[in-house]
Image (cartoon, grey):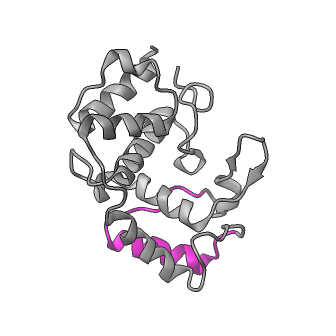
Amino acid sequence: MSLDSVAFVMEIEKRFDMRFEDDRMSAIHTVEQVAEEVCRILDVMANRSGEREQVASVVRRAMPGRSEEEPIDLPLSAGMFDELTRSLEASGCLLPDLGPFRSVRILFIMQDPGGTLESPSIGQFIDRIVAHNHHVLIPEKVPASRYAAMMVVLGIVADNAGVPIMRIALGDSLTNDLGMD
């Protein structure tokens, strides 16, 4: 296990006030598997909790008439970007760094196993905002839901891997995709 991996594991253990079992760690390869192991250890069973709805309502106000399944395939307009930023800041959250172009499509492209590129959905964008703000939205040591655990782990992975949160998928390999040996 590399220094990056050790630091990541220690941060997860500290954040959730738990310990991974050494014999199970060798079978954990993806972001999602880390979150699933946290849920198993902490006995988290619920699927959803309220932190996502808080962010989703902000995004829906800034993007009226759009469904969560729709792709974000246009640069965010200045008005939309400003509305999202103001609304999130009012709830103590920040919009993840979208770069100088404010184009979600340019900076948040997910790669599927077949190697094709696709634009993220509005729902995936909401999830990344939750993960980026996990300290504010999910402060408890034992997450209220599997979703909350996934978003905290996603946020910690982004912090430790040095990869923008908008580019990380739950199925990403910690070593092959994110460089955490």
Where is residue 53 drawn, in percent x and y? 38, 70
Identify the magenta region: 75-98
Where is residue 40 drawn, in percent x and y? 31, 37
Residue 79 among magenta residues: yes
Task: Say which residue appears at 24% left-offset and 33% top-offset.
Answer: 14
Q: In this view, does 129 lie above or below 90?
A: above
Task: Say which residue appears at 38% left-offset and 20% top-offset.
Answer: 24
* The N terminus lies in quadrant: top left
Q: Is residue 32 above or below residue 85?
A: above
Where is residue 143 drawn, in percent x and y? 27, 49
Of all residues, the one furthest to the bottom in this rendering is: 65
- Decide if residue 3 is on the left or right side of residue 167: left
- Which picture quadrant has residue 73? bottom right
Q: Is residue 66 above or below residue 143?
A: below
- Decide if residue 60 is on the left or right side of residue 89: right
Residue 170 among magenta residues: no
- Decide if residue 36 is on the left or right side of residue 50: right
Where is residue 144 drawn, in percent x and y? 26, 54
Give the total number of marks visible in the rendering. Answer: 0
